[in-house]
Image: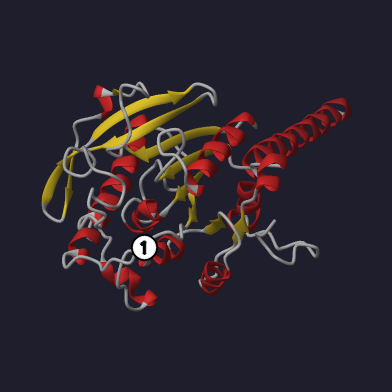
Amino acid sequence: MQKTQNADVVFLFKCLFFCIFAHKIVYHKMEKAKKILYLTQEIEPYVSGTSLSQISRNLIPAVQETGREVRTFTPKWGQINERRNQLHEVIRLSGMNLIIDDTDHQLIIKVASIASARIQVYFIDNDDFMKNRQMLLDSNGRMYKDNVERAMFFARGSLETVKKLRWVPEVIHCMGFMSSLAPYLLKLAYYDEPSFRESKIIFTPTTDIPESPFPKNFDGILSYREANRSALSTLGELKGLQDLNRIGMFMSDGVVLMEPNKHYERMAREMGKPVAVLNSENLAENPTALYDKLWDEVVRNRPKEDNDDEGFLF
């Protein structure tokens, strides 16, 4: 009888030890984000000569090289040469019609690889918004009147494609004001989708946005599922394209700046968002630090360390 009791006690201790050990393994695996989705409005070599395109080109491969799994989406702007860059359509992902302000627009997905960086890039394309059209300005240097619709199409097209891929990102990094409506959609329209239910959102604003008033159908463009203009009432008056950055920051879980910018830092902190600043040094030394800090501070609500006075700043 005594031997049986002793055996039972040993067995219980073994079970307890296994549970604790397994919990540590699971917790350790959950500590850091492993899957990161990038929605960037531009990336080299497809768009050259801008700070954002260079940062996208350097950051994404660097993060992938640390063992993180990444997916990258960008608009297929008209200046991107399909033959030279070897883009090809992915038929199984194309063909969906996205309704924006009561108008149908066909989603076309193309893909190419940056061989030197060993990353694959998905392109969001459409005959109405992208074909033979530049990023923001037409051939006469005038702003396209439908830039907000183009931003909405890029955001929705990217998110719908990720759903089709059945891929579940833990962090979604939206880079550039053309991606600014993705955080808005993720928080208000896609919040219960299995692919995005647990995702945390980072937004990187861009400063080189020409002044341009929002179109008269701005409210209609924003309306999708439960998402509508009223959710942005806290932001006050929204006048034009530059306010897309405010929307992106407001709907994100953290803000990453390409360079020090007191205006955006103050704006993000007033919204209660942790802020990081990317630079060549922290990118080279630890490209995943910004995601790890977001994971610790935002996802796990870990209190700041005593020597971490700037919170999310490097």
Mark 1 nearby-residue class (10 Å; few <14, some 14–19, many ≥20):
many
User: In the rendering, at what x and y percent does residue 74 appear?
Assistant: 38, 39
Specify the quadrant of the image occupied by residue 212: bottom left
Vertical placement of residue 190 versus 303, above or below: above
Q: Residue furthest bottom?
A: 236
- Looking at the rendered structure, the number of numbered marks drawn on it comes to 1
User: In the rendering, at what x and y percent does residue 245 appear?
Assistant: 41, 62
Please name whichever residue, 125 or 291, is drawn nearer the observer in this view of the structure: 125
Q: Residue at x 56, y 55 (%)?
A: 256
Q: Locate the C terminus by quadrant.
A: bottom right
Please name whichever residue, 12 or 184, is drawn nearer the observer in this view of the structure: 184
Q: Locate the N terminus by quadrant.
A: top right
Q: Residue at x 20, y 65 (%)?
A: 215
Please name whichever residue, 184 or 141, is drawn nearer the observer in this view of the structure: 141
Left or right, 275 with respect to 307, comes to: left
Left or right, 31 with respect to 97, comes to: right
User: In the rendering, at what x and y percent does residue 189 appear?
Assistant: 31, 54
Identify the amino acid type marked 1.
Leu
Secondary element under disc 1, as helix, strand or loop, is: helix
User: In the rendering, at what x and y percent does residue 270 appear?
Assistant: 53, 74
Vertical placement of residue 71 versus 280, above or below: above
Specify the quadrant of the image occupied by residue 120: top left
Residue 274 in sight from this viewpoint = yes
Q: Residue at x 39, y 25 (%)?
A: 112
Please name whichever residue, 183 or 52, is drawn nearer the observer in this view of the structure: 52
Mark 1 sits on what residue? 244
Vertical placement of residue 202 versus 44, above or below: below
Q: Residue furthest front?
A: 140
